[in-house]
Image: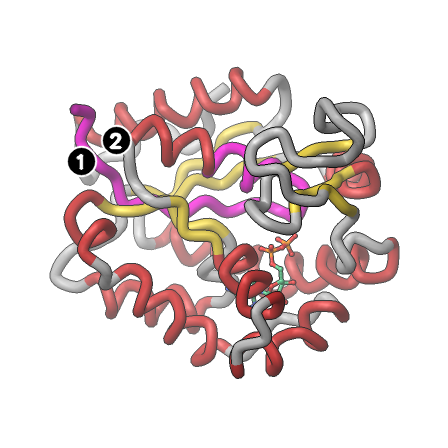
């Protein structure tokens, strides 16, 4: 079996993170740990965390670091992630979260941080047409709908437009991304973990690029020959 991996995927909303993370989690046989999906599940089942999170999420605000990192810490400490690793999607979003994550992983560290680079004009287009399954989080779009009447092909759940995919919440999330998350790119670059790949082209193209840089990294650990791959 292919060896596991400890990977963080960064990228603006609509950069295709969710799609690529699912594909990479199948390729490397590791769990896809998505903080957005975990929080939406908590909101749906009205847990104490979900009740606290709902309003902030609907406004497109980030939740407090400690709240998110407690949830992530519990997940990455489970036996499946400890044994083979994870594809972390949606976290870290701030430098404080990145520092806490590094602390949680010690004495291990991340293998790589993959930054999916997509122009803002394209993510705006993608977000306006994005539709998701309320149950399993599978992604669709107006131009790529499920086969039958907005019913998820994977699990039969209802496929809808996310409440935070409104024009207002999208611009708020992109603004927050620039302000809080983009500095992470610099932080991971300094820690020699970052590789930026173009998130444009077909989903297959992007997955192939991602697997290529991960394998390059494995064959020469500690050395990133290039920060840009095409
Ligand atoms: P997107 O990347 O499209 O904003 P996500 O599904 O990753 O969507 O997250 C949805 C919402 O969940 C965010 O807008 C935020 O409110 C909350 N959230 C998810 N991950 C984090 C995180 N690491 N830190 C703080 N808030 C988070």
* Residue 143 sits above or below residue 104 on the image: above
Q: Residue at x 41, y 51 (%)?
A: 33
Q: Which residues are magenta?
A: 1-21
* Residue 49 sits above or below residue 204 on the image: below
Labelled disc at residue 188:
none
Residue tagged 1 = 221
Q: x%, y% of residue 149? A: 80, 31
* Residue 65 sits above or below residue 29 on the image: below
Q: Residue at x 30, y 69 (%)?
A: 74
**Mark 2 falls on what kind of element?**
helix
* Between 109 and 19, the one nearer to me in the picture: 19
Q: Is residue 221 left or right of residue 230?
A: left
**Which of the 4 image quadrants contains residue 143?**
top right
Q: CA distance from mark 1 to mark 2?
A: 5 Å
* Residue 153 sits above or below residue 168 on the image: above
Labelled disc at residue 217:
2
Q: x%, y% of residue 77? A: 23, 63
Asked whether the beta carbons under mark 1 and mark 2 sit within 8 Å of each other, the answer is yes
Question: What is the basis of the colouring in this image?
Answer: secondary structure
């Amino acid at each position: 079996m292919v060896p596991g991996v400890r990977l963080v995927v960064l990228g603006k909303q609509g950069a295709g993170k969710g799609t690529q993370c699912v594909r990479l989690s199948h390729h490397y046989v590791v769990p896809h740990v998505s903080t957005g999906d975990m929080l939406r599940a908590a909101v749906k089942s009205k847990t104490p965390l979900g009740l606290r999170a709902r309003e902030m999420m609907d406004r497109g605000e980030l939740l407090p670091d400690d709240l998110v990192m407690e949830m992530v810490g519990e997940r990455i400490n489970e036996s499946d992630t400890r044994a083979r690793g994870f594809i972390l999607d949606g976290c870290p979003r701030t430098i404080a979260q990145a520092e806490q994550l590094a602390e949680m992983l010690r004495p291990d560290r991340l293998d790589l941080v993959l930054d999916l680079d997509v122009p803002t004009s394209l993510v705006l287009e993608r977000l306006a047409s994005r539709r998701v399954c309320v149950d399993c989080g599978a992604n669709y779009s107006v131009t790529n709908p499920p086969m039958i009447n907005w019913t998820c092909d994977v699990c039969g759940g209802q496929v809808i437009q996310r409440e935070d995919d409104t024009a207002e919440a999208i611009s708020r999330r992109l603004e927050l991304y620039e302000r809080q998350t983009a500095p992470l790119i610099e932080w991971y670059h300094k820690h020699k973990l970052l590789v930026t790949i173009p998130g444009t082209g077909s989903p297959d193209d992007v997955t192939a690029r991602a697997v290529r840089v991960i394998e390059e990294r494995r064959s020469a650990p500690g050395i990133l020959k290039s920060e840009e791959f095409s």
